[in-house]
Image (cartoon, rainbow, N blue to C red):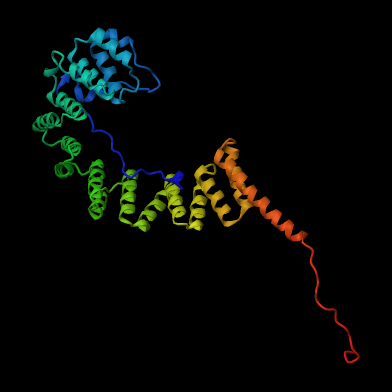
Amino acid sequence: MKRYSIYTPWIVLGGVLFFSACSQKYGRYPIEAMTEVGSFNDQVLFDEDVVDLGGEALVQSLLQSRKYSWANFSLSDAKKVAQRQGESAYVSFLLADYYYHMGQYDKALSLLETEGVDELPQLQVDDLKAQIYSEIGEYAMAIDLINSAILINRGSARLYGQKAEVYLKMSDSLSAIAYYEKAWELDSTAVDVPLRMAQLYAGVKEFDRAIAWLDRVKVDNLEVKKVKIETLRSQGNDARANVLLAEMLATGDLQSGEELMAYFTEVRQLDSVLYYSTRILERDSTNLPALFGKAEVFDTKGYFSSSLRYYESVLEIDSLNEEALDGVRKVNGKIAYLRKIKEQKESIPSFDFAPKSTKTLDDE
């Protein structure tokens, strides 16, 4: 049942992390600490009052917006800041980061050419430029900038991981693997590296290596388990994949239960579908995939009253659910047909053609 197929073949990893620590200062605050200044409420819009104040108050507000991926910052905010405080090099740098996030790469690059930006910490500027060049397909420029950043901070696992990402975009998987391995050597806590390595090895059907990389993650990480399940499925090791899914369901991950239902539906093991749908409904009595699973299995097995009960449970949650309405009509149609067959059988007269027995004197 495609309805229950919830995991895409590969986990799509997000972009790289931004801005490694730097001891230089902007104003009174160390740059690496400025992202922590103040508080943030994602329901509150960017405070326009700080635009006219300028200086460190504006920088702090922009840094807070950047920290939360510019969720409270709009294009009109960016234009106001640029018009009133555009002469500030660091403000231009932060606006470049905003436009990068918005996919306006030319605008971001032009802001990085603002006078004074080249005097900001080179590591941060090169980092942002590298990400922009990577997005627009200028991979050689991106690699050069990352190499420049590595010369400043040779111990940064993130930079090696970023370099690997660029090589992946260049379809150079061997170089990508080499730089991911270097990143892992520098930081064995980075979960994204084993995920990427597993993806690369599984892509060339080296499933044992893919699983070995995923096994390096010691923490109980849900995303790692999902990738491992997909790798095991690709390997044909469905039994082990199902064990992992059952473990995840036991911890409360209901999507894992839905994935188990999908698998057992596909292989026509209907009792297992019933079992896992029951486990899901024990935790969430309104889970639609589990209710549909039970309704359909009971329909297939011929337990029509039970099937109707679960379709009706869906309609109690969503009275206009077309699939449930169709299910009710279908099951009622089967019930009506069976009732008609029964009535027809009962209406057929029975004739007793057996000869009547006659007694003889000998019988007495």
Q: Position of residue 208 (x, y in %)?
A: 24, 55
> Is residue 39 in sight in this rendering?
yes
- Residue 286: name its quadrant: top right
Q: Residue at x 19, y 22 (%)?
A: 30
Q: Position of residue 166 (x, y in %)?
A: 18, 35
* On screen, residue 39 above or below 53: below
Pick the front one: 74 or 206: 206
Q: Position of residue 278 (x, y in %)?
A: 52, 51
- Viewport quadrant of the C terminus: bottom right
Q: Residue at x 48, y 52 (%)?
A: 276
Q: Residue at x 17, y 18 (%)?
A: 112
291 left or right, relative to 20: right
Pick the front one: 146 or 120: 146
Pick the front one: 281 or 121: 281
Q: Residue at x 25, y 16 (%)?
A: 59
- Residue 329: name its quadrant: top right
